[in-house]
Image: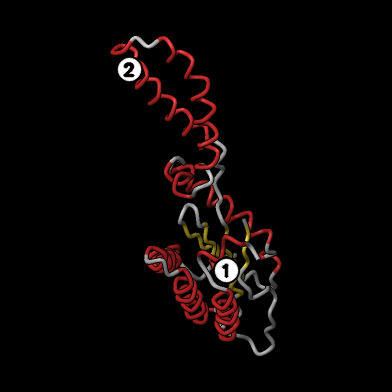
Amino acid sequence: MKNWIQSYLSDAEIKKISDIVAEAEKSTEGEIVPIIVRRSSAVGHVKWILTSLMTLVFVIAETVYIQNHWDSLSVMAPPVAFILFYLSSVYLAKIPWFQRVLTPNEDEISQVHARAELEFYRTQMKKTTKRTGILIFVSVMERRVVILADEGIAAHYQTETWDEIVRLMTDEFKKGQVYVGFEKAIKKCGEILQSHLPAASLAHNQLPDHLIIKD
């Protein structure tokens, strides 16, 4: 179990999500796969942006100080300051808030969607008999949700159908209700899929029902 997930979901809630998926799939041929990842975006740039910002502020402050005090010892400070700023930035860059603020919005969107598509294939969604897999993808750092439906499902529903579920989830996530967001989304998917893809008498489970957790 990933340690970070405990900040968002308890062990009991993770188990309940699996039960909700299994229950939702009883009424449809659709296969619902929920997945939550720590982040999708590359964040290697964050420590350098923080270091640059700290250094810039320091240089400006030092320039003003020298102009007012003519302190020759201050010229020795920049190398030491830069090292301290870098070490501080390495620590701060691990905090999701800094990662999110210092990653351009368009980069977040593209990288989250790319990760969702990658996980869609990794979870063998394409191998269901009638291409009826649906992925509910949550990327925590970016606070974004993506829903991807395979061909057997996408043929019956408009994109707006999934946008509604995304809004449903994000509304709950903004309240800090991660479990409730998953619960409502999974149940809604089950209801929607039942209309065009009701459960067949010989239907069998083709994909795992548990919540997939990844870094």
Q: Amino acid at mark 2?
A: Tyr
State which mark lies toward you, 2 or 1: 2
| Residue at (64% x, 76% y) in the render | 209
Q: Residues within 10 Å of mark 2 (few under 14, many from 20)?
A: few
- Quarter of the rendering containing residue 203: bottom right
x, y percentage for residue 74? 42, 15
| Residue at (55% x, 34% y) in the render | 87
Q: Amino acid at mark 1?
A: Pro
Q: Secondary structure at mark 1?
A: strand
Residue 34's label in the rendered image is: 1
- Quarter of the rendering containing residue 104: top left
Q: Is residue 1 left or right of residue 41?
A: right
Please tell me which of labels 2 and 1 falls first in the chain: 1
123 vs 210: above or below: above
141 vs 50: above or below: below
| Residue at (49% x, 15% y) in the render | 76
Would you name the residue on which mark 2 appears?
65
58 vs 30: above or below: above
x, y percentage for residue 36? 56, 62
| Residue at (48% x, 50% y) in the render | 96
Relative depth, front residue between 133 and 6: 6
Give the Cα distance between marks 2 and 1: 56 Å
Relative depth, front residue between 26 and 170: 170
